Image: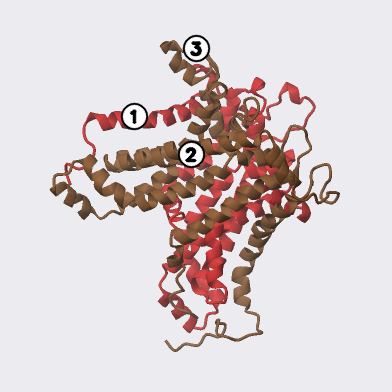
Chain colours: A brown, B red
Amino acid sequence: MMLKIKDGGNPRPKKINWNLLFFLAPAIILIIIFFFVPVFLTFLMSFTNMSTATGLTGFKIIGFKNYLQILKSQWTLKILKNTLFYVFTTLSLFNVGTALFLAIFSTHISENAGKFVRTLWLLPRITPSVVYATLWTWFTAEAPYGVLNQFLSPLGISSRNWLMSTPWVFIILINGFVGASFGMLIFTSAIKNIPPDYIMAAQVDGASTFQTIRKVILPMIRWPILFVTTYQTLSLLTSFEYILLTTDGGPGFYTTEVWALYAYHNALSNYYGNTLFGFGAALSVFLVILGIIFSIIYLRVFNFRALISEPKIEV
Amino acid sequence: MENYGFKGPIPIIILILICLPIIILYGWLILSSFAVRMEGLKPYGWTLNNWKFLLEKPTFFWQAGEENPNIWVYTFNTLLYSLGITIFTIFICTTAGYAISRLSFRGRRPLLALTIILHSFPSITLLVGIFVVLLFLGLYDRLLGVILVRVALQLPFGIWIMKGFFDSISWDVEMASLVDGCSRLKTWYKIMLPLVSPGILALSVFTFLSGWGDFLFPYIFIPSKTSQTLSVYLRSLTADVRFVDYGLVTAVGLYYMIPIILLYIFAQKYLLNIYTGGTKG
């Protein structure tokens, strides 16, 4: 292939490559404006007292005061505990646990029934969050409206607003029903990609279905399990949309407030009308740093480098 | 292999148990939108009154004197918002995806690594920073501003998907076109884009759906009533717990879900591909 193409990437300095500019400029500009600048701004703002009151110009640089305030605040420890509890419980019970169960179960029953289960469980993920939150607030509402109370009253359990009386149970259920589908899809495709020979060999040796799952399938999908675990840890740590839409961190003082929601409340929506951009930014910095660390881990651990192969033919 | 898998009545019972909660949740939504009154899952009387919002805008006593846009304005905004995101995303991801897959230039490797890092970076943590950027650019409280934000945050994912589709096209096709004297740009447009149309379709459906259901970004960055989307409108209907008209809320909710359900039924094959393909790396 001795072909010379004029606008290639051969060393030909000082000539603007218009092609490259056309193909890459829009993406790069948007990424700079909405990724790099905001990351940079978040760090800068965390050292200021910027708020609605000071506006974008009247603020002062206050050094590490925002960070000191986070350390000193009586709520920090509670919110940290909430966050860890929320991430760990939702992740283990649903995003990995239920996901694994659904994937294994739906691949070991008839093809159509399996597809039905997966389709149904994907529904919460594609439902607009506002509609989805409404479904649950109604489900947990007081008698005579709530579905849950209707089921429980024959058992002699008195009526109550379940979302407000046992907020954590429902925060975890609400997030878990959405979260399970991600792992379910990943695990399902991993299980389907296992060569049938392995399973057949186990069957020939007389293994039961359960033994095959435990000794053949689970070890073979441990890599996807690790991937889903780390990926979902990060997304749970930073997500707060469903909590905002259901309990909004309540009931009472910070009962279900997680770190990301706390940052949002301080920076963009608090009860006093004066939102503290600087303090909110300082809270976000922790999440941004965690995000950067996790993302780099993915690049290293999951061997993405192997995927960054050069194009097959260079022009 | 014939004896492999779960057999007998127990799997059927488990199947019903794990599907029941979801069927109840969504069953209630459908029943309630046509019911006069609901107690749990039991409707009392049927009516189409809940759907009146399609013809006239509902007014509430606590909003007396306020001018509320009707449902079509919100629908139009939502359509504009999700179509805007889709069109920008497709254009930028097909160009950048092509460049990363096919062009050779300095900085290609770092750019690809960056795409992957940003792909898993939780962009939601940047809300505060993005808010200030939008204020600075004069794009706060404007639909275009939120559209650009959403496109940017979706880019790493989309570029990665499109790169994968371009990678799978044989180089020979492109070579033939270049030998015939087509420019790189023309080759991209005339030869390559039609070949990756399944990818474009999948990414479009995915982007449109995620835009259509979006709540947080329009909610935070477009406070004005006239450019609000359906999700924010629906939220305003349920905001005050004391006055929630659940008949109306469920009818609006179901109306809001129609495009999603349709796309979900007809484009599911593409969607499933992108949900798994997009995250495999």
Q: Position of residue B244 (x, y in %)?
A: 63, 23
State which chain disc 2 sits on: A
Q: Which residue is mark 3?
A: A158
- State the image coordinates of residue B51 (x, y, percent, origin top left): 59, 28
Please say if A180 is above or below B96.
Answer: above
Location of mark 2 (residue): A88
- Circles 1 and 2 on the same chain: no
Q: Is residue A56 left or right of residue B3?
A: right
Q: Quadrant of residue A180?
A: top left
Residue that mark 1 sits on: B16
Q: Is residue B183 above or below residue A30?
A: below
Element type where label 1 sits in the image: helix
Where is residue B266? Give x, y as percent.
Answer: 43, 46
- Quadrant in the picture for the C terminus of chain B: bottom left
What chain is tagged by disc 3? A
Residue B24 appears anywhere in the view: yes
Residue drawn at x 80%, y 49% is A62
